[in-house]
Amino acid sequence: MDNLLGKRIQELRKRMAMTQDQFGTKYGVSGPAIFKFEKNYVKPSLELWMRMSEDCGMSERQAVLLWVKAKLPERYHEYIDLQGADELAVGETSSKYAVLEGVPEYTQVTDRELLRKMLKSDDSLPLGIRELVADDEFWVVFKPTGAEIYGVVQKFGMFHNGSKALFSEALRLMRNFLANEAM
């Protein structure tokens, strides 16, 4: 029996660098409950799953279909066709992870040192972004947030050959656009 829902929960928890207890606290459940979700012993309520899936970067439609499939007896799983663990075959053409598969959603990370550590260890990021986040001066001058890094990865991560300087400029431009939009 597949355990796509449990795998998603575990992936999210690990991307956030949290223990099962810490992750459970974030969502108002116990660490043992998270263990049971991850191991497919128990399914979270739809309400709880929707809060988690939002942090996963899933669309509401994807989240509901994945939850429904997890609740159905296995003989009915073919009615909800999932293409692998990450994409649903339900007519959705894009997801938050369409640009770079498996990129963690850094918007949830508020601790700058944890963010930096996560980014430095993320081998899925283009070399230019990894070089940028390894630069001490970048952190002092730009003071990037998780949301900004995530935005740069989502908007410009497809340019794998981009240099450190180009990704730095992309962040600067993105900030300018957002500042002008707020006016």
Image (cartoon, grey):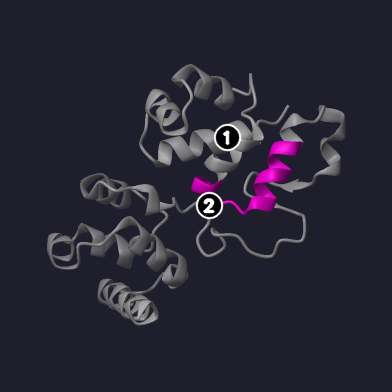
Structural distance between the alpha carbons of marks 2 and 1: 15 Å
Question: Measured along the vertical axis of the image, is residue 76 above or below residue 165?
Answer: above
Amino acid at circle 1: Leu
Disc 1 element: helix
In the rendered view, would you say 115 is above or below 134?
A: above
Query: Per the image, is 172 magenta?
Result: no
Secondary structure under tag 2 reads: loop
Task: Give the residue pinned by disc 2.
Answer: 57
Bounds of the magenta span? 54-68
Q: Is residue 137 left or right of residue 121?
A: left
Residue positioned 52% across, 20% down in the render? 33
- The amino acid type of the residue labelled 2 equals Gly
Whether 93 is drawn above or below 181: the answer is above
x 63%, y 64%: residue: 94
Residue 139: horizontal and vertical position, in percent?
Answer: 17, 61
Please name the residue shown 12% across and 62% down the image.
Answer: 140
Quarter of the image with the C terminus is: bottom left
Give residue 137's position: percent from left, percent from top. Answer: 12, 64
Look at the image and tell me in which quarter the N terminus lies.
top right
Q: Would you say 142 lies left or right of 52 here?
A: left
Q: Which residue is mark 1?
A: 48
